[in-house]
Image (cartoon, grey):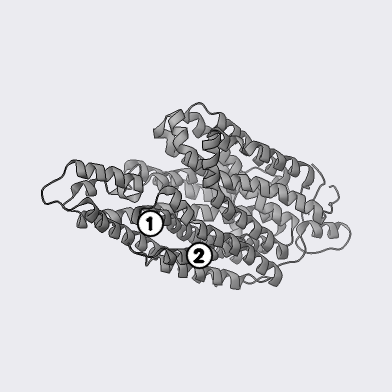
Amino acid sequence: MNAPVEVGDTSRRIVMLGTLSALFLAALDQTVVATAFPRIVGELDGLGLLPWVFTAYLLASTSIVPIAGKLGDQFGRKPLFLAAIAIFLGGSFASGAAQTMLQLVIFRGVQGVGGGMLFATAFAVVGDLYAPLERGRIQGLFAAMFGFSSVIGPSLGGWITESASWRWVFYVNVPVGAVALATVWFGMPWVRPTGRRAALDLPGAALLIGTLVPLLLALTWGGDRYEWTSPQVIGLLAASALGLPLFLLAERLAEEPVLPLHLFRNRTFLVTSAVVFLLGAGMFGAITMIPTFLQGVRGEGARAAGTWMTPLTLSLSGSAMIGGQIMSRTGKYKVLVVASLALMVLGMGLLSQLHADTAMWELVLAMVIVGMGIGMTMPIFTVIVQNALPFQFIGVATSSVQFFRQVGGTVGVAVFTGIMIHRFRDGVAEVASSAPVFVERADSLLNRQGVEQLRTAYEAAPSAGAPSFDAVLALTRVELADAIGLVFLIASVVVAAGWVLSWLLPELELQSVSPMERMRQQAGGGASPGAQGASAPGGG
């Protein structure tokens, strides 16, 4: 076993610069690419495969997160991080070079594998290099970077697409990613556990993917491509339900399970997993309704709706940094968790009062409050579980937080979108009974382009005594606002349930020594708890 290496502040900053660069690319990719899709469809055709460009990335990135967390614990973060960056860059270059939509879908899946590995590994790297007491400010910086990327992403994607080509939306990742790759290669120490055999849990990994992919497909397609009661959706849900007990059995029997079930006996891990799942469901499920309100009720265009989302993302970024700093300075986290979730409940409660003539300042105020609540939670939960578990489980702990948040978000988006559409269609059928085209094409009312197409269809076949298009449109927009308000009301209840659970979190002391420093002290005779069974071999 090589002697542990000492990592100075300068080295840590270099590693964090490379980590932030890689994460920024992965986060930016999720918003930049969307603006290029009209051009992509125009050049590659294959409109029917367009949803798979999103779906392939979602399936790959979500499925790989817990697996990557476990592999990082077993083999060390450095080789996994290098592989993640290389896979993401390879997928980016291949996506830019794609000649057909099918190729683009496949390469986006490769990108998703790299992106999921990046997210799972990068946050665990912070756990390797920084003490729990310091991690809050670093994780807050990461969270703020996510908010910043969501602000500039759409505009940057539009500028690149119009100035060069949609292919450069993918190619631009390569030079920046290459710098991140070099920084990690030369600057990051290789921290890996010793004293136990690194056994790959291939059955567990396969069953996890076999359980998760059908679930995500069912949630993505249900109510959109297929009815919830269709054989396709029911079959996918049944396959997922069958896979879950098999996965749990495999994890009980595995020597080194992908998701060690005994971690759920840790109160902090159990409560955190439940809370982040509920937050993911409430947060993502509801926030996706804001652009729909702006476009469908207020009549804003897609670009203007994106601009109006800026207060939410800016408040998220600012509060993430502030929350991280407060946690690092005080060493306390529970009061931040309780306060931030209370802000989210308050903000979503205000959003539930949206109606067709809501003033924009009221919407902005509610978004700022929600953004402040979300931002403060983002750096906290990762630090909480990292602090509560031994060093050899940092990767699993970190990836679990992301995994449960992502799955919760997918569930929330699917369920809340279904509730909104069902409530909206019922409302349109009631108020627009004299205008059957509105009932038949109710989904067209959710954005400006659809409204104009509906106007053309309505005015092309006028009927005697029928109300004007604008009169019916105003009534349907009231129904849409009510449907969106219902979603926010339910989301506030979901987040409130998470707030109640958060009171069960124990307040553990945030330790002031990093795992690597502990290992160095232990190697030098200054034993300290929590470093057993780990070593930090040097270099690349």
Q: Quadrant of residue 233?
A: top left
From the viewer's perspective, is 276 left or right of 534?
Answer: left
Q: How many marks?
A: 2
Q: Quadrant of residue 172?
A: top right
Residue 17 drawn at (x, y percent): 72, 49
The answer to whether residue 69 of the structure is visible from this angle is no
Q: In the drawing, what numbered circle is on residue 368?
A: 2
Q: The residue tagged with tag 2: helix, strand or loop?
A: helix
Residue 528 drawn at (x, y percent): 81, 64
Q: Give the residue furthest to the right.
A: 524
Where 302 sits versus 47, above or below?
below
Residue 210 drawn at (x, y percent): 49, 42
Q: The residue tagged with tag 1: helix, strand or loop?
A: helix
Three-letter amino acid code at the position of disc 1: Phe
Where 450 sits versus 337, above or below?
above
Three-letter amino acid code at the position of disc 2: Val
Rounded to the nearest angstrom, the CA distance separating label 2 from label 1 is 16 Å
Give the residue number, with chain letter if any, for mark 1.
293
* Label 2 or label 1, whichever comes before in sequence order: 1
Residue at the image position 20 percent from the left and 54 percent from the top = 432
Q: Give the residue furthest to the left.
A: 464
Q: In the drawing, what numbered circle is on residue 181?
A: none
Residue at the image position 88 percent from the left and 61 percent from the top = 525
Quadrant of the snapshot with the C terminus: top right
From the viewer's perspective, is 289 left or right of 280?
Answer: left
Q: Few, some or many C-alpha atoms within 10 Å of disc 2 (few <14, some 14-19, many ≥20)? A: many
From the viewer's perspective, is 178 left or right of 432?
Answer: right
Q: Few, some or many C-alpha atoms within 10 Å of disc 1 (few <14, some 14-19, many ≥20)? A: many
Residue 58 drawn at (x, y percent): 50, 44
The residue closer to the viewer here, 332 or 77, is 332
